[in-house]
Amino acid sequence: MEKARMLCFTERGDSRGMLIALEEAREIPFSIARIYYMYGMTSDLSRGNHANMRSRNVYIVLRGSCVIDVDNGDEYESFLLDSPAKGLYCEPRTWKVLHHFSEDCLLLALSDIYYDAGEYINDYEQFLQAVR
């Protein structure tokens, strides 16, 4: 899908453990303005259910797993996040539904803009009108 893709991060490690370094404009394809994380979700709920009209985002599961469904108005794809060595990059104007959280899921999100409630579309039909 052209509006979302998996990123693979370089793992470095030895007998002391693993390390992944993320640098903006390198592994993360934008300058980072905001970092947030989600935890305590249950497998029967979903989060997201919206589109960001201006911001780009990267989602990285630090522990556990989840599924993120993305939709650009024409195509739909599901991505399994189950390793801190990969992340899901989503461009603006991408509908996202996060679900199937494992009990221990810790999900990190990076964004290129500060929080702005006005850039969210929470109604799927309005989203389709906006992208078409």
Image: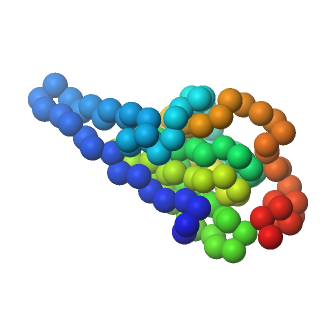
Position in image of residue 84 (x %, y %): 38, 41
Q: Residue at x 27, y 31 (%)?
A: 19
Asked whether residue 99 is in view, the answer is: no
Position in image of residue 34 (x %, y %): 60, 29
Q: Residue at x 79, y 43 (%)?
A: 119
Residue 79 higher or lower than 119, as above or below:
below
Q: Front-most of 83 and 74?
A: 74
| Direction from residue 124 to residue 91 in the image, left or right | left
Q: How is the image coloured?
A: rainbow
What residue occupies the far top of the structure in this picture?
16
Q: Residue at x 66, y 44 (%)?
A: 55
Position in image of residue 46 (x %, y %): 69, 49
Which quadrant does the N terminus fall into?
bottom right
Q: Front-most of 112 and 49?
A: 112
**Residue 57: quadrant of the picture:** top right
**Residue 69: quadrant of the picture:** bottom right
Position in image of residue 80 (x %, y %): 48, 57
